Image (tube, rainbow, N blue to C red):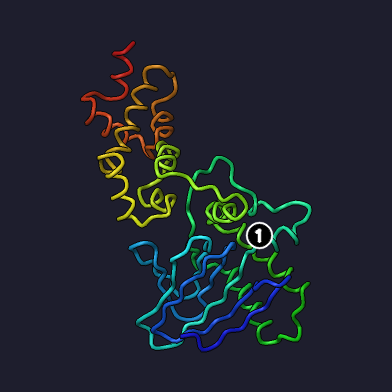
Amino acid sequence: MIIDHKKYELFGKTLIQKMVLKPPFKFTFPTTDNACFIYILEGEMQYQLDDEQIDIPNKHSLFLNCINSGKQISNSNASNNNELVIVNFHPYILKKIYDKEFPLLLQSPKNKISNKSIEKINNDFLIQKYIEGLIFYFDNPSLVNDDILILKLKEIVILLLQTRNVEAIQVILSQLFSPTTYTFKQIIEAHLFSQSSIEELAQQTNLSISSFKREFSKLYNDTPANYIKTKRLEKAAELLLVSDERITDIAFDCGFNDLANFTKSFSDKYNITPSSYRSNSK
């Protein structure tokens, strides 16, 4: 239940909102052509992704592509009211205020194949201070004008560039300007030899882990862990024969994060160590 809702508009579109919700509640995001930054000012909330629930604690935030429908935040347990601040990222407004050149955050990351639509952002001191600044303007609405709103939007863009989540946020924002949707197999093949974990691959496909595993099994007739390891070892075996790269470099290039793990996995599959495999072939 929404018990208080304040908002500021820029160029005819809602830019910044402050909401107070009384639990239990379920708030579904409408399908719109914008992304939004949601900061949990008071309390904690749950975000529903597919068949899994993501907990968003106090002072944490969520970056969300609102083009994807059926996503909601909720809280059924807390006794106190929940407060959140939302900053909307409209393509129309972004193009208007960055008429010369988009900052790095708004540029599509090169060669990144992903359908990722949400990113959880941990407690960040600079973002916390930014939110405190927004609260000042909600408490003093007479000071708010278009110039202030443009400044605050540009400020959050700069701050998001400083977080460790910048790559994921770039992917989400790029979907607003180039709404390309990749198939499940395209995403798997693109990340097959990266350092991505099963959890990260599930995020790239925009599925929960359980749904990701079901879809993977249906398409590949194998578990993700077994299939990916097999493909990585097959590539490593090929590189050992045709390349003079160090074994450590080959292991890393094929998606293994340490030599010991690679050597054991390779020996288990081929009954020979990588170095012996290379020596015997020559």
- Closest to the observer, 213 or 32: 32
Which residue was labeled with disc 1? 91
State which quarter of the image contains the C terminus.
top left
Quarter of the view holding residue 278: top left
| Element type at mark 1 | helix
Where is residue 264? Give x, y as percent: 26, 33
Where residue 73 sits: x, y (%)? 44, 73
- Judged from this view, the residue extending furthest toward the top is 282
The 10 Å Cα crowd at callout 1, few under 14, some 14 to 19, many 20 or more, is: some
Q: Is residue 240 above or below residue 16?
A: above
Give the x, y percent position of residue 246: 42, 25
Residue at figure coordinates x 44%, y 43% from the top left:
187
Please state which of residues 241 and 73 is positioned toward the viewer in this rendering: 73
Query: In the displayed structure, would residue 230 be above or below residue 44?
Result: above
Quadrant where the N terminus sits is: bottom left
At x 69%, y 61%, the residue is 92
| Residue type beneath disc 1 | Pro
| Residue drawn 52% across the image and 65% down it | 31
**Quarter-of-image position of residue 242:** top left
Question: Left or right: 194 with respect to 210?
Answer: right
